[in-house]
Amino acid sequence: MAYQKNLNLIGPQLRKLRYARQWSQARLSMKLRSMGWHITRDILAQMETTAHRITDCDLIFLAKALEVNVIYFFPPAFTPETVRAKIHSRRLKPILANNFTPLRRLNAE
């Protein structure tokens, strides 16, 4: 088996957030498609195993679909307050403002 690079940092947390909702990869990919993102279950599986890059736009779609703040995809050292202070994009602020109601952070297990 060839060496596989880790192409994203949020795949394991994406899986935890999906599991917390008891959603299958197929259900999440269907939800994302209903939002206008043409993604397959296979690509979602690759994201979860860190075998596929995740862009900032991908992250926003994922957060909206899972109804969480984007901060919950990152390691616990990141907090909503530290991320909010670093957002300077006029296009992202309205989107994140509507999705900035933090849910409890899942325990890293």
Image (spheres, helix red, strand yellow):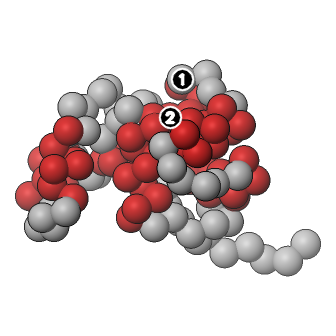
| Direction from residue 40 to residue 34 in the image, left or right | left
Q: Position of residue 49 (x, y in %)?
A: 67, 55
How dense is the environment of label 2, judged by Cα within 10 Å: few (below 14), some, or many (20 and up)?
A: many
Judge by depth and name the residue closer to the eye, 12 or 43. 43
Labelled pair 2, 1 in contact (Cβ < 8 Å): yes
Q: Position of residue 48 (x, y in %)?
A: 63, 51
Judge by depth and name the residue closer to the eye, 59 or 14. 59
Question: Secondary structure under badge 2?
Answer: helix
Q: Position of residue 64 (x, y in %)?
A: 39, 40
Task: Residue at 51%, 50% (x, y): give it.
Answer: 36
Task: Residue at 45%, 35% (x, y): give it.
Answer: 66
Residue 17, which numbered label? Answer: 2
Looking at the figure, which quarter contains the N terminus? bottom right
Judge by depth and name the residue closer to the eye, 81 or 31. 31
| Direction from residue 58 to residue 43 in the image, left or right | right
Residue 42 visible in the displayed image: yes
Type of residue at label 2?
Leu
Type of residue at label 1?
Arg
Q: Which residue is mark 1?
A: 21
Task: Residue at 40%, 43% (x, y): give it.
Answer: 63
